[in-house]
Image (cartoon, rainbow, N blue to C red):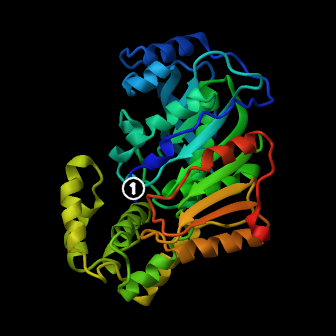
């Protein structure tokens, strides 16, 4: 999957739509340190007046002086954070990310929020947006939204940017990370309101969808107005049958390798040799890489993959992988807020039939979904021109079009 959705960074300047809750002024030392980052000073720890406890509480925070000059000059308060995410049934986890607010005084009710869920960057700790000065391309998105009057939270997801095991394509785990990034943002910058929208593409599209399902029960103190999922990796169970049949696309084989390696790190009982043969087994280490210095070796390894190199070797192994992928999939229940789902019918990473089926199940839950199925579009070229207007309408209280009723 693409490292980022660069098409989404060409942002319209949306009107500032305030929330409706009281806010507490940002602690003076944190404000000074954040402002120093804009001037390009050395990184400094942010001393958070009340780091909190539990979900969204802050483990550590520091300034980000090396953002692109255009972002720094646009006037933002920025911090790289490590925050806690307490996931039911799993326990406390630590997740890294980045949080931003516009400069100046917040509107009444605090800054409205965009929680951005990034697309696939890899499964290693070094593959996080927060490890890149440009946020792997998302800095333009930050500049656009903060200029428009929005606070922005970008989770790295667990295991990227901070020790842990990245749960690749596990929408549910990533959904918690997306929500708790909003809490972390509000912990660092208390002039942020409670109204927020989730926005993600590819891996992040599934994360935004899951966050929409979880929000009402997991974060009732926040007001989710809507979620955008572009080319979402909603339900990838179909990878198993395609691996067995030898019909994985050239893009799906390497994707499945990251899924399997990620699963093996979280489940020591998973035997990778049940899912890899031929060149996949020989080149496993090269296929796992994600950093620029590893890109050449990974590309070469991808070219050597055979049609059935990822086929489960037994029916039991196939069933176990199906079960694992089902546990990561959405939908699992009704969503909290309206949703926009845009995807292409020529996607070589996520079969269009898989997204069609996920949407059909979501509509059966009674969800309000604006569906934009784009003819001839693939994975990285989905047209996101409607995203900002759709988000602006949700903050403005305009009812969303519901294509589930058509």
Image position, residue 245 (x, y; %): 39, 88
Would you name the residue on which mark 1 appears?
2
Identify the residue at image location x=57%, y=49%: 385
Image position, residue 316 (x, y; %): 45, 86
Image position, residue 177 (x, y; %): 56, 47
Taking the image as drawn, is residue 98 in sight? no
Quadrant of the image containing the N terminus: bottom left
| Residue 120: quadrant of the picture | bottom left
Identify the residue at image location x=76%, y=31%: 19
In the displayed structure, does residue 120 sit left or right of residue 406?
left
Q: Out of 367 and 283, give the one closest to the viewer.
A: 367
Taking the image as drawn, is residue 364 in sight? yes
Identify the residue at image location x=61%, y=42%: 180
Above or below, 5 against 99 in this view is below
Identify the residue at image location x=58%, y=67%: 329
Secondary structure, mark 1, is loop
| Residue 12: quadrant of the picture | top right
Quadrant of the image containing the C terminus: bottom right
Above or below, 59 against 353 in this view is above
């Amino acid at each position: 999957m693409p490292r980022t959705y660069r098409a989404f960074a060409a942002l319209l300047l949306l009107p500032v739509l305030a929330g409706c809750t009281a806010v507490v002024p940002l602690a003076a030392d944190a404000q000074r340190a954040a402002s120093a980052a804009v001037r390009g000073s050395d990184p400094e720890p942010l001393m958070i007046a009340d780091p909190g406890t539990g979900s969204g509480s802050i483990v550590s925070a520091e300034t980000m002086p090396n953002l692109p000059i255009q972002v720094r000059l646009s006037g933002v308060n920025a911090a790289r954070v490590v925050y806690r995410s307490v996931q039911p049934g799993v326990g406390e986890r630590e997740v890294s990310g980045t949080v931003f607010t516009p400069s100046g005084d917040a509107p009444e009710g605090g800054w409205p929020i965009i929680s951005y869920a990034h697309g696939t960057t890899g499964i290693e700790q070094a593959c996080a947006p927060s490890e890149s000065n440009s946020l792997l391309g998302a800095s333009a998105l930050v500049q656009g939204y903060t200029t428009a009057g929005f606070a922005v939270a970008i989770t790295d997801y667990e295991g990227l940017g901070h020790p842990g095991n990245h749960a690749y394509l596990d929408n549910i785990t990533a959904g918690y990370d997306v929500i708790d990034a909003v809490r972390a943002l509000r912990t660092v910058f208390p002039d942020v309101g409670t109204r927020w929208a989730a926005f993600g593409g590819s891996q992040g599209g599934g994360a935004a969808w899951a966050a929409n399902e979880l929000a009402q029960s997991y974060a009732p103190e926040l007001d989710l107005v809507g979620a955008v999922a572009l080319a979402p990796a909603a339900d990838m169970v179909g990878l198993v049958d395609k691996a067995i049949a030898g019909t994985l696309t050239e893009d799906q084989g390497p994707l499945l390798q990251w899924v399997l390696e990620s699963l093996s790190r979280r489940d020591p009982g998973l035997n990778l040799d049940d899912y890899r043969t031929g060149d996949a087994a020989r080149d496993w280490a090269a296929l796992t890489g994600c950093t620029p210095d590893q890109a050449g070796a990974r590309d070469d390894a991808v070219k050597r993959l055979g049609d059935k190199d990822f086929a489960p070797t037994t029916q039991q192994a196939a069933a176990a992988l199906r079960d694992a992928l089902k546990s990561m999939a959405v939908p699992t229940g009704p969503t909290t807020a309206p949703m926009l789902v845009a995807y292409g019918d020529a996607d070589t990473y996520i079969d269009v039939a898989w997204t069609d089926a996920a949407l059909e199940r979501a509509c059966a839950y009674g969800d309000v979904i604006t569906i934009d199925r784009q003819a001839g579009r693939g994975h990285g070229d989905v047209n996101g021109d409607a995203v900002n207007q759709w988000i602006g309408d949700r903050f403005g209280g305009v009812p969303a079009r519901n294509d589930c009723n058509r």
